[in-house]
Amino acid sequence: MNRFHRWYCRSGRWKRKIQDEILPWTLRDVELRDSVLEIGPGPGVTTDWLRNRVKKMECLEIDPVLANSLGYRLLNTNVQVQHGDATAMPYSDGSFSAVVSFTVLHHVPSFILQNQVFAEAHRVLRPGGIFAGVDSLPSTLMRIIHLGDTMILVDPATLDGRLRAAGFTSIRIELGAGRFRFSARRPYPTN
């Protein structure tokens, strides 16, 4: 991320917007249950809001500096932070009741790697578990904020098919102001 983007993601303005608007809308009617994995927590603004609403939480952050900083800040809480890549998650199959992603998918540098994130989220979920999140829609402001950054926007019109290809069912996608939210479920075995 460029310097402005890093600064903004730590700002009080972004924290208020995330915690007062984006997260309540994103997770409305989403049951996370007992063990949640957050992909790409960055500085932990989303983590701070979510950790007070779940029993146990794991965070997977690709940036080693951010992972170390967040892990240190959240020592002795219900959150464990690990440095790693969401395209090759270091967790066993069926480890989590929910996987969440908040404004992260557009930072994954290709459609193929985004699809790998979807497949990995499916793999680490328990049957019946939910994959939920929010990401941005195209805008001039998004292009400006991401100058010099990776920005591969997910098209909500194609997301249903991409999530189905990863094995998800019960897919919901809803457009909002400048963003979309999604949820999908790992089905129970049919045997």
Image (cartoon, rainbow, N blue to C red):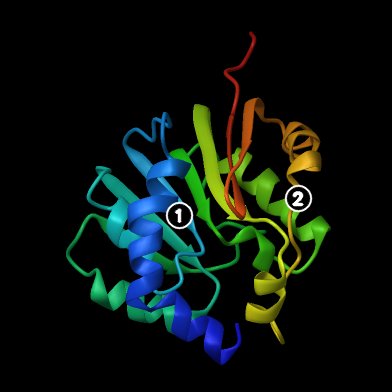
Residue in front for this viewpoint, 150 or 5: 5
Q: Position of residue 54 (x, y in %)?
A: 27, 43
Residue 83 shown left or right of residue 104 in the figure: left
Q: Position of residue 85 (x, y in %)?
A: 60, 66
Residue 64 shown left or right of residue 15 in the figure: right
Residue 68 shown left or right of residue 93 in the figure: left
Label 1 is placed on what type of residue?
A: Glu
Regarding mark 1 in the picture, which secondary structure is present there? strand
Label 2 is placed on what type of residue?
A: Asn
Q: Residue at x 24, y 69 (%)?
A: 74
Query: How crowded is the residue under tag 2: few (<14 C-alpha within 10 Å), some, or many (20+)?
Result: some
Q: Residue at x 33, y 51 (%)?
A: 57
Q: Position of residue 23 (x, y in %)?
A: 41, 49
Q: Residue at x 75, y 69 (%)?
A: 109
Q: Residue furthest bottom?
A: 3
The residue to which callout 1 is attached is: 38
